[in-house]
Image: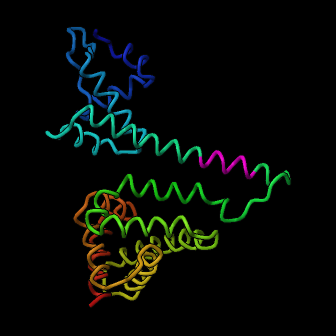
Amino acid sequence: MEYTINQLAKLADVSTRTLRYYDQCGLLPPKSIRSNGYRVYGQNEIDRLQQILFYRELGVELTEIGRILEAKSFDGQTALQNHLVALRKKRERLDLLIDNVEKSIKAMKGEIEMSNKEKFEGFKQKLIDDNERNYGDEIRKKYGNKAIDRANARVKGMTKEQYGEVEQLTQELNDTLKAAFQQGDPHSELAQKACELHKQWLCFYWDDYSKEAHMGVTQMYVDDPRFTAYYDKIAPGCAVFLRDAVRIFCS
């Protein structure tokens, strides 16, 4: 069965503008274009759109989706199985947040007592799940499952105060790194302060700190596009700048 762009938009509950954009960026070209200029989509395009929407639901960027779908190793059935696992984890996290809200309402009514630690369980799990989704494969290959599982356990065991401290430290690190980058000198006092803040941030998750590991992780920020994209959101080139500053910090 074939669909026009309007029919497919209605079927998939997306806008025609979205489908046109997917075509323009090469993510979802139509099966054919009629003489009147109308796009026509077939079963292959429908299945591909389903995969795109699954990946978007999981927070994957469009450029990364295109890379995944075009890979020679891509298998639709395996991808669906992976989507199922990821969506179940997302549902578990949402269930945890819903339970958190329900308990908070009861606590405010005086029906139950709720510890401060319980109030943040859902948010900490979201942090863990987001990190696993975005960076899990790479960091587990580099540091091993045991080390990452221990780091996740440390996050889950954080108190309200510790969780808030991590959030505050992350913001201070990003602000300091941005200001140091604008100065342009990785040797500067501000750049080295950013390295010290980054060390403190790592120690929230690592069992043991070493200069070699610190330099290694910042090199990974440069080598892996996902990490590079995170730091380059602060300012383009920040990942390389941080790596260079940390090399000086650890020398």
Q: Which residue lies furthest to the bottom in this view?
A: 251
Q: Quadrant of residue 26?
A: top left
Is-magenta flag for residue 99? yes
- Tell me the quarter of the picture where residue 197 sits: bottom left
| In the depicted structure, whether residue 109 falls above or below residue 216 | above
Q: Give the range drawn in magenta.
A: 96-104
Q: Residue furthest right?
A: 110
Residue lying furthest left in this view?
Answer: 72
Q: Which of 170 and 207 is in front in this view?
A: 207
**Secondary structure mainly formed by the magenta segment:** helix
Q: Which colour scheme is used?
A: rainbow
**Spot occupied by residue 240 in the image (x, y as percentages of width and height):** 26, 71
Query: What residue is shown at x 60% (from left), y 58% (from top)?
Result: 121
Q: In the image, is residue 203 above or below residue 249?
A: above
Which residue is more in the foreground, 183 or 163?
163
Residue drawn where x is 16% and y is 40% of the image: 73
Placement of the C terminus among the 4 image quadrants:
bottom left
Residue 111 image position (x, y, % from top left)? 84, 51
- Across and down, in percent, residue 189 comes to 39, 88
Q: Is residue 123 left or right of residue 225?
A: right
Instruction: Name the side, left or right, on which 150 lies relative to 144.
Output: right
